[in-house]
Amino acid sequence: MPEVIVPIGPQHPALKEPVNFRVIADGEKIVRLELDISYTHRGIEKAAEQRTFIRALPLLERVCGICSHSHSTAFAKGVEELMQLTIPPRARYIRTIIGELERIHSHLLWLGVAAHEIGFNTLFMWTWRDREAVQDTLEEMSGNRVHYGMNEVGGVRRDLTPSQVNAALQRLPNLEERITKYVDMVQNQETMLLRFRGIGKLTREEVLKYGAVGPTARASGVDYDIRRDDPYLVYADVPWNVVTDTSGDVYGRTCVRIGELAESLKIVRACLEDLPEGPIRVNPPKTAPKGEILSRYEAPRGELVHFIRTNGTDRVERVDIRTPTLANWTSVAACLVNQNLADIPVIVAAIDPCLSCTSRITVVDKGDGNVDIVTLDELRRRSRLRDRRQEGA
């Protein structure tokens, strides 16, 4: 049978974000995958370089809606380290609480999407209902459900009141009970076992070869988590465990994320119960000395990296973001080989991809020795022209 090209995307291929798969198949079996992710480049890195640290922080928070606190924390702690600034203990605890609530929110959202991809919409509605309790807690603490705006260079912007702490603690028992049910469901529910087990397998060696991170790597036996192996905030001071699995398939990635839900609840409870008194911020210097730093953060999807270069002014000279989704795409292309076409949605969903925080600008060398680099001003000019054309249409 001749090979057939099956185009998927770029509009709504599996998620509500643009990505283009060119799947080369032999019958129902996938031979290889060609991937194009460059559809949502927004120029955030370049825009951040034009702003002061204070103004860049909320911009970088908007790299991703689900990982907004991850990006702002990675940037803030990188700049603080360059400034040799130590934030107060209470601020470190509050950052940790928001970060782990964000992880719970992200994993519950992911579990619902994974269930939806296999037609298990009852689980989709259950997990998103439970996610509302987490969203309510985040809204009470920060005032927002998506971009929390809690971080600033030198600490956090908002303190937690006793009533907010008590309300969060009262929601935890129900969430703990629900997560126990999800653990039992994943282990025994026939639909999930049939659709997840043995699908999209990655060996430990393949994970290390392709540089996969987060639950994708830990599901293949790679015992690595930035929170433990390069600790920051209060992760070295509270009890928790890194969750791993050895099956290396979609089922293993599901087990890791559900296990992390329980561990995140454990961290949140410990931080809320032992929240220290004291200030929530220190006044940072206006400028940062000349230097470079690689700021690492364990986002819900895996290791997030912000490379930051400063030049003695009140803004960054360069900020370069390596998101976990970008690190995991190669593993998707590898584990789709020899799988059935029908398994594409669940294998792609298993890395919990985020396209908006992944796309980067592409420079095409046409071979004539001339490379056309678009400046920020030219990018703005083209954007205004596009808007005018759309208004005229």
Image (cartoon, rainbow, N blue to C red):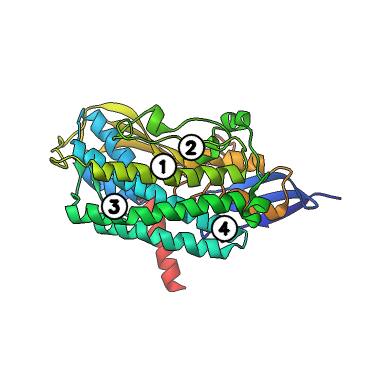
Q: Position of residue 302 (x, y in %)?
A: 46, 39
* Closer to viewer: mark 4 or mark 1: 1
The residue drawn where x is 49% and y is 65% is 125
Q: Position of residue 128 (x, y in %)?
A: 45, 61
**Is residue 257 depicted above or below 164 in this figure?**
above
356 relative to 196 in the view: left or right: left
> What whole-number distance in Å separates the C-alpha atoms at marks 2 and 1?
8 Å
- Residue 143 placement (x, y as % from top left): 25, 59
Mark 3 surroundings: few (<14), some (14-19) or many (≥20) residues within 10 A = some
Q: Which residue is mark 3?
A: 169
Q: Amino acid at mark 4?
A: Ala
Is 295 displayed left or right of 124 in the figure?
left
Q: Which residue is mark 4?
A: 115
Q: Secondary structure at mark 2?
A: loop
Q: Mark 3 and mark 4 in contact (Cβ < 8 Å)?
A: no
Q: Amino acid at mark 2?
A: Val
**46 or 193: which is nearer to us?**
193
Residue at the extreme bottom: 393
Q: Which residue is mark 2?
A: 243
At numbered mark 4, what does the secondary structure look like: helix, strand or loop?
Answer: helix
Mark 4 or mark 1: name the one nearer the start of the chain.
Answer: 4
Find out whether the residues at labels 2 and 1 contact each other: C-beta distance under 8 Å: yes
Between circles 2 and 4, the one closer to the viewer is 2
Q: Reading the chain from its start, which is encountered first: label 2 or label 1? A: 2
Among the two numbered marks 3 and 2 on one chain, the one whose residue lies closer to the N terminus: 3
For badge 3, the amino acid type reads Leu
Q: Say which amino acid is labelled 1.
A: Glu
Q: Nearer the viewer, residue 147 or 308?
A: 147
